[in-house]
Amino acid sequence: MTFDELKTMDDTYVMQTYARFPVDIDHGVNATLYSLSGKEYIDFTSGIGVNSLGCAHPRWIQAIADQAGKLGHISNLYYTQPGAQLAKTLCQRAGMTCAFFGNSGAEANEAMIKTARKYSFDKYGKGRSTILTLNRSFHGRTIATLTATGQPAYHNYFFPLNEAFRYADPTWESVLEQAGDDVCGVMVELIQGEGGVNPLDREFVQKLAGLCQEKDWLLLIDEVQTGIGRTGSLFAYQQFGVQPDVVSFAKGIAGGMPMGGILTGDKCAKVLSFGTHGSTFGANPMSAAAALTVLDILDDGMMAEVKEKGEYLRAGIRSIGSPELGDIVGMGLMLGVDVKGPRTNKELAALLAENGLLILTAGSRLRLLPPLTITKDEMDKGLAILKQTLAQ
């Protein structure tokens, strides 16, 4: 099949909800991908943070194949080893108490929202259901998570939205302005991904955690993008000096297989009881087996490597010395680079793809989310394409 044939088929039969680059990907190894025609691309996207082990990692492939040969799916009416083992591993490494598994980041955040509202209803009754979120946040595309998202542009067309969300700027004063007796929780991304790779201030996060404890609000941390090693620790909150009541995860957890979920502390361990929540495919054995392999590979040594690779990319981008690029923000292998013009970040990303480097955008920045296993050689190739493109 040629690219033109593929594009025609997609245009004809697939809902056109994505602004795709004129690029097809057929196969790859780690952070090096190839099109149908054999063109090589260096991947600084990892499928928007999903392919934590890159493409075609042999241990990941083997784990899925072995599990597929035993049991692909059975539902949560019965016990399976991979799901229970995964819950234990995540809880022990995250300092949490129990897990719920779903399929995606939006589903994970839905579970977090439901946990917060039921916790408050069980303890205080009706009327205490509002969740504070931050402007420029992104929490998903279901109606509830879309409403939680603090970007009005995403809300259009889908009215009426869910009730009981309010938005604050990431400042102490703004949070206090939005506070009230109807609040049950505060939901934040420690680094706002889709909103522009905006890291929150550590002191602000710690004060927010203290306020939640004082008011008996739940501290809800959305780590769909920042979690599972992306920032150089299993979860980003482990570098902010706070412990959430509930944390959500998805994207990189199963290295490319669909999975999401939440972890809760003691306070919320029994909130979602029988009949109050569920997921047909949650803790799917193949996804859980893949996730166990991801976590086994992402040990403390690998977390240190993620931080080192992030610093290597920062230094490489700075060394290019282009007036078109500005500040570099983020943690680990979640980086944002200011684009100062004359080209926009989207124009630059399109030109980079044409030249063989796949990169993301967020807000007005370039966004880098390469596989956590990316090699020095692959980073050097990507940086060389960036330098060459900026010189065009």
Image: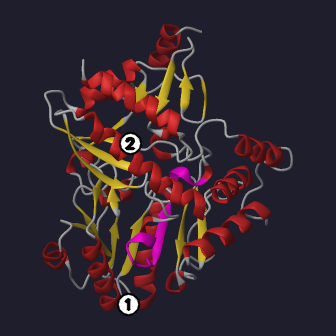
The amino acid on which the numbered mark 2 sits, given as a three-letter code, is Leu
Instruction: Give the image location of residue 271, x and y in percent.
Output: 53, 81
Q: Earlier in the sequence, mark 1 or mark 2?
A: 1
State the residue at coordinates (53%, 76%): 264
Whether 347 is among the magenta residues is no
Q: Report the quarter where the C terminus lies.
A: top left
Q: Is residue 326 left or right of residue 95?
A: left
Mark 2, residue position: 368
Instruction: Give the image location of residue 70, x and y in percent.
Output: 86, 49
The amino acid on which the numbered mark 1 sits, given as a three-letter code, is Tyr
Residue 339, image quadrant:
top left
- Disc 2 element: strand
Crowdedness near tag 1: few (<14), some (14–19) or many (≥20) residues, C-alpha within 10 Å: few
Mark 1, residue position: 124
User: What residue range appears in magenta?
Assistant: 238-253
Residue lying at the far front of the rendered structure:
319
Visible residue check, residue 97: yes
Could you tell me if the residues under marks 1 and 2 are in contact, i.e. CB atoms within 8 Å?
Answer: no
Instruction: Give the image location of residue 45, x and y in percent.
Output: 44, 38
